[in-house]
Image (spheres, rainbow, N blue to C red):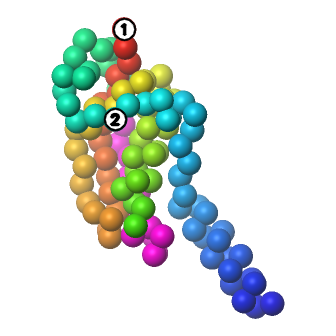
Amino acid sequence: MKARLLIVGAMLVFSGCAASLTATGSAVRVTNNPEVVRGMEYIGTVHQGAMAGGMAGVVNSSERAYTKLRNKAAEMGGDTAYIVSEAGNNVSGVTVTAEVYRKK
């Protein structure tokens, strides 16, 4: 019984760390090529971080940061996220900054 409670507790802790890509977020293109956004309408800037939280976080902090970034860009009405900077690592956490654009 105690083992079951421990497993359920761990699942609750790690589920808070998960980030799911939304349908609109999956349509957002991520690029570091400035030519891709040339001629597009600038919407705004997104700063998104994901901390490494335990064993699951070490492996996935970069992936979570990009997933959250794509979702935020879609919420802003963007279809392209141009990566301006990425700092950190999968051990301490990752912060990504992107400019959000949409086709005119």
Region rendered in magenta: 46-58
Is 19 magenta? The answer is no
Q: Amino acid at mark 1?
A: Lys
Q: Tell me where residue 2 appears, x and y as whole percent.
A: 76, 91
Name the kind of residue labelled 2 in the image: Val
Residue 9 figure quarter: bottom right
Residue at image position (44%, 67%) is 57
Q: Which residue is mark 2?
A: 30
Left or right: 74 as drawn, with respect to 8: left
Q: Residues within 10 Å of mark 1 (few under 14, many from 20)?
A: few
Task: State the SS at label 2.
Answer: strand
The x, y position of residue 78, in whole percent, is 42, 24
SS at badge 1 = loop
Quarter of the picture containing the C terminus is top left
Say which of marks 1 and 2 sits in front. Answer: 2
Q: Is residue 90 above or below residue 29?
A: below
Q: Which residue is mark 1?
A: 104
Please name the residue shown 46% across and 45% down the image: 68
